[in-house]
Image (cartoon, rainbow, N blue to C red):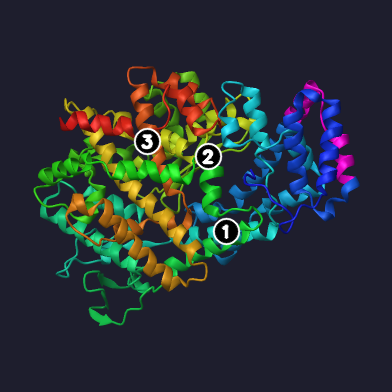
Amino acid sequence: MLIGSLMYLNGQAAIDPSVVQATIHTLTAQDNGNKAGIEKGVNQVARLWQETDGDNAAFRKFCETNYLADPNEKYQVFLKTSNYLEAIYGHYNEMSLSLQKSLHLDDGPLLAIDEMFGSYSPSTHLSDDLYNNKITFLIALNFPHLTLEEKETLGTDRKAWAYARMGDLFTERIPASLLEAASGAESDADIYTSQYNIYMGHVTNAKGHYLFPEDMILLSHWNLRDEIKANYNKGKEGLDKQRTVYEVMKRIVSQEIPVEVINSGACEWNPYTNTIKQEGKEVKATPEATARYQKMLNNFKAMQGIDKYTGNTFIDRKFNDNMEVALADVEKLFDEFLSAPELKEVGKMISKRLGRKLEAYDIWYDGFKARSNLDETKLDAQTQALYPNAAAMDKKLPDILMKLGFSAERANYLADKITVDAARGSGHAWGAAMKGQQSHLRTRIPATGMNYKGYNIAIHEFGHNVEQTLSIYDVDYYMLSGVPNTAFTEALAFVFQKRDLEILGITDPNPEKKAMDVLDKIWSMYEICGVSMLDISVWKWMYAHPDATAGQLKEATIALSKEIWNKYYAPVFGVKDETVLAVYSHMISYPLYLSAYAFGQIIEFQLDQYLEGKNFANEVERIFRQGRLTPNQWMILATGSPLTVEPMLEAVREIIK
């Protein structure tokens, strides 16, 4: 869907203001009860209208001919338009799914033709086509865009919300070539990160000893992070592994990593000395230099090209339009959490549990989770037996849902609309865009079967799929399908992921489990808030330095990561100038997406508190049938409270006491 700000042709209105006012006067005389709506609609069409669409007379004739004064006729047009758009968006979604299949699925080596088709976006000319046949103008005239403040007043009027979401569709006019460039830049970055594997069996520790299984291949940053998490409570060997993985991460951030060890096991690599060997002999290493940051810069340039057609920046569009939460409010919320004195106390707890001072990679401390005290080798064996391949997991989706409390009928209803694929990368969830389509659950499945890490990710993605299914199949209006923003689908994914052991039939008899869960969420939120702040800061820097090179962006990103670390983490960790926050691959291939995870965790915490003691399945279905309201309205109707970090902080205060 095309959502954004209003624009003028080359900074000037294409329609004479007097003609706009005369048109408003004529339509108001026909329908005096909708004066505000008429003014909005006519002005919106005028802002989108270009010389190629016709002259002033053509504009006025169009508005007077196509304004829908009869509420019943307007409703019928709304329903028909919704059906047409569902067909268009649904089939474009199916095309994109097919074109990117080889990029996302583990179906053999990637060929150049795969990347060429995968970067092609079939829908880039859709907007132009809809403007050319004036469908967009009819929609904008009769279903004008509402501001965030106006939407917040709609309450529980479902039809008004659906009309408002139709009004969000056409508020900007971007040339197809620019949309194509943006899609290509993001696809190129996605390919880069999906193939950024480290062959850990060929990585040594500081002393040149091999620590990892010979066949272990870890995707950056996701699997590297998970390997750090998996090595808590593993003694000196586990600590050695963690420190070695962190050295790998630092080389990736600094781009000192040799290109010879990226997605290849041809060389033996000591990340501490950053030297490589072949057949026992040291050979010259070629540093990656700036490739990582060039991908970020490519995304920035593509988005910057779109800015002049929207009248705002990609940052504005991401937060004000897509998330529908102002950037200032986002930063204030994150700062409030990151500055909380309670975090120092939690840090002290972790240090005591570890029996050592905190190190930078302990932002991923996993010891509060029940599974951290379990033998992951046994967990691997269990998940490999249950899910040897994608087909096996696909078959067991109803069982997973029933273990979460869904009835057999509802479990089968939902599972029939979801399919499982073996992913080339770490995995993701790809939702349907029309009824009749399936959502796709994608996770990495080795030849030996799905290990516990893959299973844990799969349950997270399954949460996305359940949301995607409920919010398109069970929502009353297609225009309300989905959730307020990506943070809300992340919330349900986290809620599902938290129950991964429960699904396996593993229970934790620990009476302190609830307190441990709170501490785990607090520490996880601590990690992701800082990363999100860095993501925002880097984009602010790029806009302040639009002509920067990839090398300058690298230095700025490293400096900003240290700055944020020193402000929010050094007081807790006792070490300065760490760059761990900059390792996230999301910053490369999913621009400004990381904040969705932070909001997702806030929402998840509030949802979890609300769901406690209630029928989990029934409430999940009720809540996610709300569809795409604004974030605060959604939260109030879901849980009775607006979006806030205070419940998280209050919960940890109680534990500290």
Q: Give the range drawn in magenta.
A: 58-80
User: Looking at the rendering, in which quadrant would you find the C terminus?
Assistant: top left
Contact (Cβ within 8 Å) of mark 1 with mark 2:
no
Residue of label 2: 324
Under circle 2, the secondary element is loop
Would you say 172 lies left or right of 326 here?
A: right
Would you say 339 lies left or right of 483 here?
A: left
Question: Which amino acid type is marked by label 1?
Answer: Met
Q: Mark 3 or mark 1, which has the lower sequence index?
A: 1
Residue of label 3: 602
Cα separation between marks 3 and 1: 28 Å
Residue of label 1: 303
Image position of 13 with respect to 469: above or below? below
Queried whether the magenta region covers residue 453, the answer comes back as: no
Image position of 84 with respect to 227: above or below? above
Q: Where is residue 268 in the image (x, y as percent from the top left)?
A: 27, 72
Assess disc 1: are there few (<14), some (14-19) or many (≥20) residues with their C-alpha within 10 Å of its C-alpha.
many
Q: Residue at (37%, 35%) from the top-left corner?
A: 602
Q: Residue at (43%, 40%) from the top-left corner?
A: 461
Image position of 70 with respect to 539: above or below? above
Assess disc 2: are there few (<14), some (14-19) or many (≥20) residues with their C-alpha within 10 Å of its C-alpha.
some
Contact (Cβ within 8 Å) of mark 3 with mark 1:
no
Under circle 3, the secondary element is helix
Question: Which amino acid type is marked by label 3?
Answer: Ile
Main SS class of the magenta portion in the image = helix
Cα separation between marks 3 and 2: 16 Å
Q: Residue at (10%, 44%) from the top-left corner?
A: 352
